[in-house]
Image (cartoon, grey):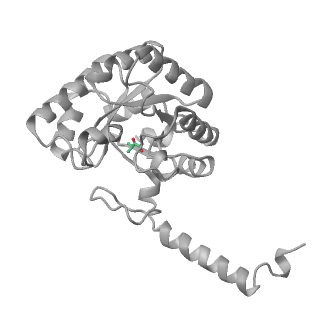
Amino acid sequence: MSIHKDVKKVTTHVLQNMKDNGEKISMLTGYDYSMASIIDSAGIDVILIGDSASNVMAGHETTLPITLNEMIYHASSVVRAVDRALCVVDMPFGSYQGNSKEALSNAIRIMKESGGHAVKMEGGEEIIESINRILSAGIPVMGHLGLTPQSIYKFGTYVVRANEEEEAQRLVADAKLLEASGCFAIVLEKIPAKLASEVAKAVKIPIIGIGAGNGVDGQVLVVHDMLGINNEFNPRFLRKYANLHEDMTNAFHRYIDDVKSGDFPNEKEQY
Ligand code: KIV
């Protein structure tokens, strides 16, 4: 039996049932009303209002500049479009890493002002106080370990994380800590497939991978990447399901040509 086909509204409990029944979880990012509406109608399980909006929507080099207000704007646009998917909102850089009381009030703002269903936070032990405080307010938290882009200036590079034994052991310990705290799922980004699969076996909560192989409980991609909108981003883990860069460029060329030649609008396209 497919949970995916029967469920009218995806909750954190539905995701746990999917893992328990061996059904993979599908997740994509979304940032605006129109795209989220299409993604949700297609039957995705989770829409992540990712802070990758900083890159793909705002054109920043990293995810660091996006603000809490901007995340709330994107999340509320997505939530208005969605009937079925669970909407998870990234807490932006600087909104939870310091004072855990501030972290809680920022998470509450996200939930109240966007209508999102859960928040996602990058990190393990170092942010556990904030995670615990947010969980204790009844806000579901998705963890994020491995390559955590908000720490890019610490890593210095976007290469695969946890290749070394010490970092791999720390990652497993962090995943167990997030599970014990009550996080409902964890994203693992860009780590060796074998390690990701070990983590998915070591914890009971769903593990969603991006560049983490097939031995996990679900997959997430940035929607602009999988649609091929940016043709310069081609990491090994990315499968492109469309070439919208080409399709859109062709459409824009045709429109420009039609305007310049006077072909558009024709008689049927005017009043
Ligand atoms: O912001 C984002 O898009 C993410 C995914 C890469 C998991 O965190």
Position of residue 23 relative to residue 232, above or below, is above
Q: Is residue 116 visible?
A: yes
Observer-nearest of 21 and 237: 237
| Residue 48 place in picture, x, y as percent | 47, 40
On the rendering, which quadrant does ligand 1 occupy? top left
Q: Say which quadrant the N terminus sits in.
A: top left
Query: At which x and y percent is residue 123?
Result: 31, 29
Q: Position of residue 253 (x, y in %)?
A: 60, 78
Residue at (75%, 85%) from the top-left corner? 263
Left/right of residue 204 with respect to residue 93 in the rendered view: left
Give the quarter of the figure containing the C terminus.
Answer: bottom right
- Kindly identify the residue that appears in the image at 24 percent across and 35 percent down: 200
**The quadrant where residue 187 appears:** top left
What count of labels does the image hold? Answer: 0
Q: Is residue 217 visible?
A: no
Residue at the image position 35 percent from the left and 60 percent from the top:
239
Quarter location, residue 260: bottom right
Q: Is residue 43 above or below residue 22?
A: below
The one of 83 and 98 positioned closer to us in this rendering: 98
Residue 144 lies, in percent from the top left, at: 33, 34
